[in-house]
Image (cartoon, rainbow, N blue to C red):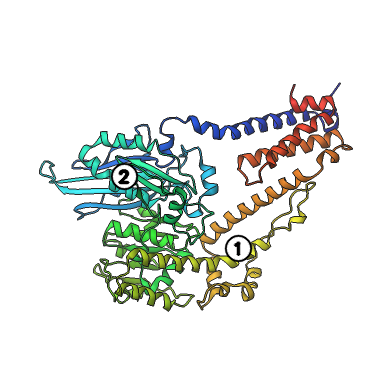
């Protein structure tokens, strides 16, 4: 005789249900064991949670730039990635030690070796997520005279390659290890990498002690739950208390923040913030790789806590494999920020809409007078003066009180770190004033909680309507939190056409969908499911059990932020259903 299930839903139903059951069981076990697997990681797994690899790039008289060493030795870089890495050695006139950063595209098909991606991504701020398609390169370059070398110069770079945008941490790490490496070479590098492989993995919200060659760096990994006004140093001190150490730790106030004040154009900060917010194509022409890379990274960070979703290259050279892609004149410039040092680029990028030409940095009372906004037509010669060459008309008015405050700080010789904190706070509040109305409107698109029932699929989130949002600005716009006047509506309309809006909306939509899924799971667990199935047919029970298992599997796989006990309760419900079904149905569900 055919089974009850087959008789009700047709041949093959047994196999479908059994496959679903078996598949979900396997995946649940895999997901639940993921945490246990991290305890018995393979060699270099802890290292991989911080760095992809460490490279030594040298200048060979016959071969040119070449990678001399990659550590760990089993890391495989593609030819394109190697070309990228070596292209950043091509800059003249940098005698002594130089530090800078770059960003390169990963080769297609490369997979991360780090197991904790989901857990880190769930708790880290959006601006500090691991890169899935790019690598960051943090460079310590040394060029000194050396009679023992044919060319007369020792030229070598130590490069840390990572998916993490921890620029301040990794540049500080290089300041410690690079001088040692240049003196002791490979044995020193091997020892450093082994020490990094003993570091605890980066966990958002935790303060960590990271030992390396006799120095302990103390850092706090930011969490998306941190208060925006919180000082990383104070938060770290609260968490570790007055813990004593034989070696006094080197406390880093931030793992990622740069001195924003050093690279800003005081009276034009409003314009630069708008260009970043709108994802406009920008070229930064700087006197050195250090100034180039730090300026680009400072600009990208100016719209935090909003994530900059366009491409950006802190240091870009004519030897870059993607040089042609970004310099073609047959189409409009792409949404990217390029940091360059070669004067050749002035002619190449004449068609770009926004060019920032930097001179040597000076800190004086008349700093704003040194940089002016100029028409693009004036950008013609190699000796072009510093300035912002753009036709962009700002939507918002300048904040004169901020400019006066920072100018007064210069005159009083206020520390650059304090000036930077004032500026960062201003930009944070400005970005929040812009985003809060969007967040408020987005919340109104969520279904009411009472409309989520255990017996139906969760209701849909209403689609985003630009015109409907614009209608909310009169009574709930940025004017509630910002004193700045201007064309806010025009700024929003331009923002809607930018990659930054698309990236923000996709992320928020994903988070809202997960929240709805969590609410549905909680409602299911609070319902009288056992009572509901008493008068239901076997096929309805099969359908319910399969759907509950799918939900459970999805919640575990995506690490949905459900309340404590919900998943255990749901799994208990599934087990409780079996005695209420026929013996034949139990055979299908348990696969005896």
Look at the image and tell me in which quarter the N terminus lies: top right
| Rendered view: 39 above or below 312 | above
Residue 382 placed where, x, y %?
A: 25, 67
| Rendered view: 185 above or below 266 | above
Residue at 43% x, 60% y: name it: 301
Residue 80 seen in the figure: no
Q: In this view, does 12 lie to the left or right of 48?
A: right
The numbered mark at residue 159 is 2
Look at the image and tell me in which quarter the C terminus lies: top right
Q: Is residue 502 left or right of residue 572?
A: left
Q: Calculate the distance from the C-alpha at mark 2 to the C-alpha at mark 1.
A: 40 Å
Residue at 19% x, 53% y: name it: 95
Residue at 48% x, 65% y: name it: 428
Q: In front of the other: label 2 or label 1?
A: 1
| Mark 1: secondary structure | helix
Residue 122 placed where, x, y %?
A: 55, 47
| Rendered view: 315 above or below 494 | above
Residue 155 seen in the figure: yes
Residue 205 placed where, x, y %?
A: 49, 49
The numbered mark at residue 439 is 1
Image quadrant of residue 411? bottom left
Residue 109 placed where, x, y %?
A: 47, 40
| Rendered view: 295 above or below 137 | below
Residue occupying the far right of the picture: 535
The numbered mark at residue 557 is none
Residue at 63% x, 45% y: name it: 560
């Amino acid at each position: 005789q055919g089974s009850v299930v087959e008789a009700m839903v047709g041949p093959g139903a047994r196999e479908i249900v059994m496959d679903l059951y078996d598949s979900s069981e396997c995946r649940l076990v895999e997901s639940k064991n993921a945490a246990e697997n991290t305890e018995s990681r393979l060699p270099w797994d802890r290292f991989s949670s911080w760095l992809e690899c460490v490279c030594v790039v040298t200048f060979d008289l016959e071969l040119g730039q070449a990678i001399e060493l990659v550590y760990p030795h089993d890391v495989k870089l593609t030819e394109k990635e190697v070309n990228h890495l070596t292209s950043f050695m091509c800059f003249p006139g940098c005698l002594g030690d130089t530090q800078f950063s770059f960003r390169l595209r990963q080769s297609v098909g490369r997979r991360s070796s780090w197991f904790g991606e989901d857990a880190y991504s769930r708790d880290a701020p959006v601006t500090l997520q691991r890169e899935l398609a790019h690598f960051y390169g943090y460079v310590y370059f040394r060029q000194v005279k050396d009679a023992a070398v044919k060319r007369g110069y020792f030229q070598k770079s130590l490069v840390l390659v990572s998916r993490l945008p921890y620029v301040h941490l990794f540049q500080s790490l290089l300041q410690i290890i690079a001088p040692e490496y240049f003196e002791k070479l490979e044995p020193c590098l091997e020892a450093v990498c082994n020490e990094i492989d003993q570091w605890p993995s980066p966990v958002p919200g935790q303060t960590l002690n990271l030992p390396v060659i006799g120095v302990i760096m103390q850092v706090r990994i930011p969490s998306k739950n941190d208060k925006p006004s919180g000082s990383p140093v104070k938060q770290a001190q609260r968490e570790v208390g007055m813990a004593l150490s034989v070696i006094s730790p080197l406390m880093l106030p931030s793992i990622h923040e740069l001195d924003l004040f050093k690279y800003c154009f005081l009276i034009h900060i409003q314009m630069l913030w708008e260009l970043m917010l709108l994802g406009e194509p920008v070229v930064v022409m700087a006197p050195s790789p250090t100034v180039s890379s730090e300026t680009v990274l400072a600009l990208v960070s100016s719209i935090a806590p909003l994530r900059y979703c366009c491409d950006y290259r802190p240091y870009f050279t004519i030897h870059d494999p993607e040089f042609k892609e970004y310099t073609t004149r047959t189409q409009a410039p792409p949404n990217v920020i390029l940091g360059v040092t070669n004067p050749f680029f002035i002619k190449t990028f004449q068609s770009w809409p926004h060019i920032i030409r930097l001179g040597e940095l000076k800190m004086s009372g008349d700093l704003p007078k040194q940089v002016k906004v100029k028409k693009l037509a004036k950008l013609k010669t190699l000796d072009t003066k510093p300035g912002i060459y753009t036709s962009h008309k700002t939507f918002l008015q300048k904040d004169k009180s901020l400019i006066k405050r920072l100018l007064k700080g210069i005159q009083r010789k206020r520390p650059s770190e304090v000036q930077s904190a004032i500026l960062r706070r201003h930009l944070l509040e400005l970005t929040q004033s812009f985003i809060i109305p969007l967040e408020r409107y987005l919340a109104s698109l969520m279904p009411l909680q009472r409309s989520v029932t255990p017996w139906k699929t969760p209701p849909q989130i209403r689609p985003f309507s630009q015109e409907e949002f614009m209608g909310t600005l009169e009574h709930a716009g940025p004017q509630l939190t910002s004193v700045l006047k201007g064309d806010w509506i025009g700024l929003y309309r331009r923002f809607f056409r930018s990659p930054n809006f698309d990236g923000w909306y996709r992320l928020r939509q994903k988070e809202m969908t997960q929240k709805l899924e969590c609410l549905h799971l909680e409602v299911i667990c609070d319902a009288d499911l056992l009572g509901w199935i008493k008068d239901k047919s076997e096929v309805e029970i099969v359908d319910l059990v399969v759907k509950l298992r799918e939900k459970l599997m999805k919640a575990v796989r995506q690490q949905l932020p459900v309340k404590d006990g919900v998943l255990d309760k749901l799994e208990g419900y599934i087990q409780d259903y079996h005695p209420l079904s026929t013996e034949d149905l139990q055979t299908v569900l348990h696969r005896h």
